[in-house]
């Protein structure tokens, strides 16, 4: 790919330094993704500028008009402190007729709304756990179709926010307690679904019209200890000391039952299309002991840190980190947004 002018969009506090000298591992973890992407793109000869965005898009409009980037590399996960608002930044880029990487605003909205996405997937007969939404400020009534144990999480938040061992509940009293916790600590609604005991698998997908899936990747929970449930809590996903202590690792999913890899591939593609996604995404599954996969959620624009799951599964498929970023750039520049359909 010829050298491009690339504007990398990050949260205003996550613009990475030129060098990691003097920073602790814990400090670097805060902006590792941004650092990896920027340094790799620069090493590949691109002209790269980072832009930290808080609660204003004025500088974004100025830079796109004056510097005229070939593409914006979108690493935003929120806007103005609201996680769901990053889709509006992407919509703004479309109105500016500015190419960008990652998912389109429609796909971001559908996949971010866990209840709506599960309703869409159920319509398409893609297996997902039975669920109910408990709205903040409403009375809590447990439908008879739900069977314990149940899993309680935020209906909109990502990155395992609000998920802990207590998220899996065995009776009505604990369900009520956890739903109230989600209401109070996220100021949003609680999504309650039947808990699927089994293996936790991830499947990466990238593409616009033509799709490619990555090899199934597995989160291995190691030795969490007696009384612990194997779920992807915030500590399991992001606390490196906790991961090392309990032997929690991720890697290629081995010894899958016959036909499961092919089934995951088909489901991942169907989910991607049903939710109108583009660019790249990661589908999260639970694989029951009988070999039945259930989709938990679809994640638009998953973490692109070089040592995290998406990049590692791509490398397992023979796609280097540099090649992965180049593909994401090409998909962003090639996406047929509405303004290109005339």
Image (cartoon, rainbow, N blue to C red):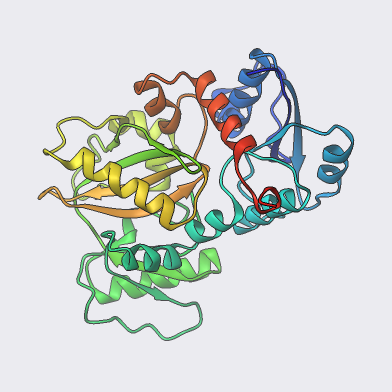
95 to 66, vertically: above or below: below
- Specify whether 228 is left or right of 39: left
126 or 30, nearer to the observer: 126
The quadrant holding residue 331 is top right
The quadrant holding residue 64 is top right
Note whether residue 279 is visible.
yes
Pinpoint residue 169: horizontal percent, then vertical percent: 27, 65
154 or 131, nearer to the observer: 131
Pinpoint residue 177: horizontal percent, then vertical percent: 37, 72
Pinpoint residue 112: horizontal percent, then vertical percent: 50, 58
What residue appears at the point 55 percent right and 59 percent down from the top-left corner?
109
- Specify whether 257 is left or right of 179: left
What residue appears at the point 64 percent right and 44 percent down from the top-left corner?
76
237 or 102, nearer to the observer: 102
What residue appears at the point 22 percent right and 36 percent down from the top-left corner?
223
- Counting the numbered discs, the total is 0
Note whether residue 231 is visible.
no
45 to 271, vertically: above or below: above
Pinpoint residue 236: horizontal percent, then vertical percent: 37, 41
The quadrant holding residue 83 is bottom right
320 to 228, vertically: above or below: above
> Where's the N terminus, which quadrant?
top right
- Specify whether 243 is left or right of 330: left
Residue that extends furthest to the front in the rendered view of this protein: 342
């Amino acid at each position: 790919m010829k050298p491009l002018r690339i504007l990398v969009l990050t949260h205003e506090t996550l613009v990475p330094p030129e060098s990691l000298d003097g920073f602790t591992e814990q400090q670097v973890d805060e902006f590792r993704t941004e650092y990896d992407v920027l340094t790799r793109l620069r090493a590949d000869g691109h002209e790269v500028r980072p832009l930290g965005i808080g609660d204003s898009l004025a500088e974004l409009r100025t830079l796109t008009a004056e510097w005229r980037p070939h593409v914006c590399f979108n690493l935003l996960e929120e806007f103005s402190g609201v996680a769901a608002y990053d889709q509006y930044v992407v919509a703004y880029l479309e109105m500016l007729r500015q190419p960008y990487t990652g998912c389109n605003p429609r796909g971001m909205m559908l996949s971010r709304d866990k209840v709506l996405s599960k309703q869409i997937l159920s319509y398409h007969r893609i297996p997902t756990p039975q669920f109910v939404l408990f709205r903040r400020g409403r009375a809590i009534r447990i439908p008879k179709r739900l069977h314990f144990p149940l899993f309680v999480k935020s209906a909109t938040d990502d990155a395992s926010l609000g998920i802990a061992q207590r998220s899996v509940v065995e009776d009505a009293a604990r369900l009520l307690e956890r739903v109230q916790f989600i209401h109070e600590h996220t100021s949003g609604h609680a999504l309650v679904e039947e808990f699927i005991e089994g293996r936790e698998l991830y499947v990466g997908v990238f593409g616009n019209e033509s799709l490619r899936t990555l090899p199934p990747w597995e989160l291995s929970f190691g030795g969490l200890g007696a009384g612990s449930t194997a779920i992807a809590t915030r500590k399991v996903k992001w606390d490196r000391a906790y991961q090392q202590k309990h032997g929690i690792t991720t890697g290629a999913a081995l010894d899958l039952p016959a036909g499961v890899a092919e089934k995951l591939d088909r489901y991942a593609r169907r989910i991607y299309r049903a939710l109108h996604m583009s660019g790249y995404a990661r589908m999260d599954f639970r694989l029951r002991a009988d070999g039945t996969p259930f989709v938990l959620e679809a994640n638009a624009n998953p973490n692109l840190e070089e040592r995290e799951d998406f990049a590692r599964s791509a490398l397992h498929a023979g796609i280097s980190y540099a090649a992965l970023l180049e593909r994401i750039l090409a998909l962003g520049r090639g996406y047929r947004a509405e303004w290109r359909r005339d």
